[in-house]
Image: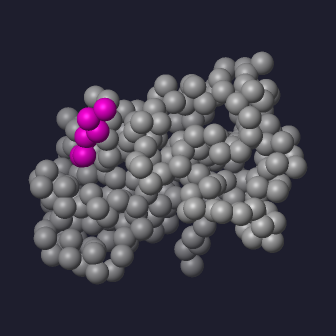
Amino acid sequence: MLTVNDIAMMIEAAAPLSLAYSWDNPGLLVGSRRKEVSKMLITLDTNLFTVNEAIEQGCDMIVSHHPILFRGTKKADYDDPIGRLLELLIKNDIAVYAAHTNMDNAPEGINARLAEIFELEDVKVLEPDEKLPGAGLGRFGKLQKSMTAAELCKLVKERLDTPAVRAAGDMIRPVSTLCVASGSCAECIDTAIEKGCDAIITGDLKYHETMDAAEKGIFIIDAGHYPTEVMVKDIFSGLLKNKGAEIVISRAADVFKFI
């Protein structure tokens, strides 16, 4: 029988905790490492939907990308959303493990998978991590064929299975070198410009920072947080399948609805 610790070690072999940023909170967040696990839920987020999903499915553990405890929670008030989640998890004896920025930065993590999704060639790490070769934030490389920024927007919608993106810059600009940076990576844009990227795909961009960046000459696609990270479920599944515990993939969708 697998334990929570067994699962944690398998994830950390691919995405060491040392790759996480100092402000992050990955690892075991709820439960005991000794707990036996026969069924686990794999998800991008730990929220009320996914916790109830785990309860309904009879899961012993949730493996999540985003940590449930992140912004300095100091109390478990059961009338508070986070407190309510903790109450449900503890009462139902469900462990929660998160691999966050360590999975973003991992050599075969989310950004590496994004580079695969867009079939980039001669892929390099945008901001390398000195602790592990091949690790770091973002990836950039050559598209298999040059295309206009407008064509790239269409490709992003298809490859990330999202109905819309936000874009800034010259729509007829030719794009051959593309940067991908999962989640919220506005801070990567200047580095992408320095590396000679024609365009960047990321998420959660603000108005003024986008305007400033576009005026520097790079084409910007905000594909959203969820679409640029949801493939983490496939990554977790690949790491943990056939290891002795049943896997349930969460049905949770993007919090944003496109009207």
For the point 56% across and 63% down, which residue is it? 71
Where residue 177 sits: x, y (%)?
18, 50
- Image coords of residue 258 (percent x, y): 55, 74
In front: 128, or 237?
A: 128
Looking at the picture, tell me which residue is in the foreground, 52 or 219: 52
Asked whether 40 or 149 is in front, the reply is 40
Residue 197 shows in this picture: yes
Residue at screen point 36% across, 76% down = 206
Is 22 drawn above or below residue 247 in the view shown? below
- In this view of the protein, can residue 238 be seen by the observer? no
Q: What's drawn in magenta, residue-wise?
A: 125-131
- Residue 11 is situated, as x and y percent measured from the top left of the image, at 55, 30
**Which quarter shows the N terminus?**
top right
Is 69 rendered above or below residue 136?
below
Tell me which corner region of the image, top left, top right, bottom left or bottom right, holds residue 164: bottom left
Q: Is residue 74 left or right of residue 158?
A: right
